[in-house]
Amino acid sequence: MIDESTAHIIGGGIGGTTAAIITSPLEVVKVRLQSSGGAKILNSNLTSTVESAASATASKSLTSSWRRLIWLRTVADIANNEGKRALFKGLVPTILGVLPSRATYFYSYHSGQEFFGKYIQNNSSGIYLCSAIFGSLTASTLTSPIWYIKTRLQLDSGTGSKSLTVLKVIVSTYKENGIRGFYRGITASYVGSLETAINYVTYENLKAHLLSWDRRRKRRTRDEQGQSLIDCIESLRDKREYLVNKQMELLRIQLREEVHRYWWMPMRFRSSKPEVVKTQEIIDLDRKLIPLEEQLNLFLMEENEFQSTHQTADLRGSTGGSKMQSFSDMLLIGLASCCSKGIAITIAYPHEVVRTRLREPSGRYHGFVGTLVKIVNEDGLRGLYRGLATHYIRQIPNSGIMMGTYEGVIFALQYWGLMRVNGVASDRETK
């Protein structure tokens, strides 16, 4: 039996690792396009593609299409020139980074909600804002060296013996800059806490709205099913009552005829009083009614349980156990996460580009603000959004997979009775 905090460590680690493995090729492309060499990739690919066009009109159309599919072409180029394994460059440090990073983040995020909930008004989005920032700062500080190594490996385009290894990156970085070298780009990561805050505040509210909508939808369906069940039972009961009354009426007629026919005979010598005998039709109705009435009783018990446990529940946050009712809710969780991540990326994307530049081995970039200004001077404002399309394609599904898996793991641990919620065993275990 594990406590709630441990469950969030496990869920965060599994969710982050699953998403990282699935979206690894797009992460490599994103890092290449964000780097200072990204412009060369764009221009060389675009030029070679346009030159192969037969006419100016075709070139214009091809250019437009190419810019939309630049990430796909980059994937193909990496696979052709460097081998398919290159699409998973940096996967090992990515997993080594994601596993502790997400585990640390979700543990800190959960603990932050418990802490800030004591000082901030209940049901306020400020709780999730502060918790998200706290979790992001904690995770960034602890795992920055791993992300630095991962970025260096993904920026490397060498093959064979010339390609970088984790050991080579560690040795060269330490020789050149010491321990501080592994924390290059940490300022940008701290600025990225803004994106995390926007993401999780939006996510918690979207999650609550979607789960609430789904519960209302299920409630309407349950109400309709319950009403249909009640109508069916009442109809069968009415029919049974009619048949019983009809049988009773026949018996009364029979008794009157007997009294009239044998009026002269003492009562003790008459035939015994006729009994109500169930006809086959009544027996068949009883066979139908018994399981339906049992089903109705079970439905009413579930309805009372729903009223007591879910009607007033706050569907935001991670405290108090899982907010899911079934594994199908993972789809709604994933949808909420995809939407919130898209919004957060759009607002805070430039810090990603700055962080990648700061981690380049060239040493041309120093300081968050200085790098930001240099990118604008060299590439214009568009340079701050280089690789954005690929970032969308990678991060949005990554976020959906990660949060869906994370919430699913928490729900599974609680559902199977393996997790204590606020020190109390789950209902399944106590039963």
Image: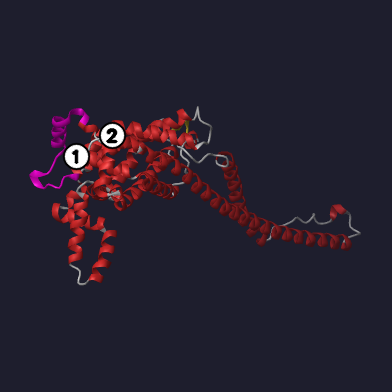
Secondary element under disc 1, as helix, strand or loop, is: loop
Residue 301 percent coordinates (x, y): 59, 43
Camera-near label (1 vs 2) is 1
Tag shown at residue 110: none
Q: Amino acid at mark 1?
A: Arg
Label 1 to label 2: alpha-carbon separation? 16 Å
Residue 103 percent coordinates (x, y): 34, 35
- Front residue of 351/332: it is 351
- Front residue of 134/316: it is 134
Magenta residue span = 155-180
Residue ID at (22%, 50%): 38
Mark sitting earlier along the chain (1/2): 2
Residue 338 percent coordinates (x, y): 39, 49
Residue 279 lies in what quarter of the image? bottom right
Tag shown at residue 364: 1
Residue ID at (75%, 55%): 275
Q: Residue lying furthest left in this view?
A: 161
Residue 35 falls left or right of residue 158: right
Q: Residue lying furthest front in this view?
A: 377
- What residue is shown with label 2? 186
Q: Amino acid at mark 2?
A: Ile
Residue ID at (52%, 39%): 314
Residue 345 falls left or right of residue 26: right
- Front residue of 96/386: it is 386
- Queried whether the magenta region covers residue 167, the answer comes back as yes
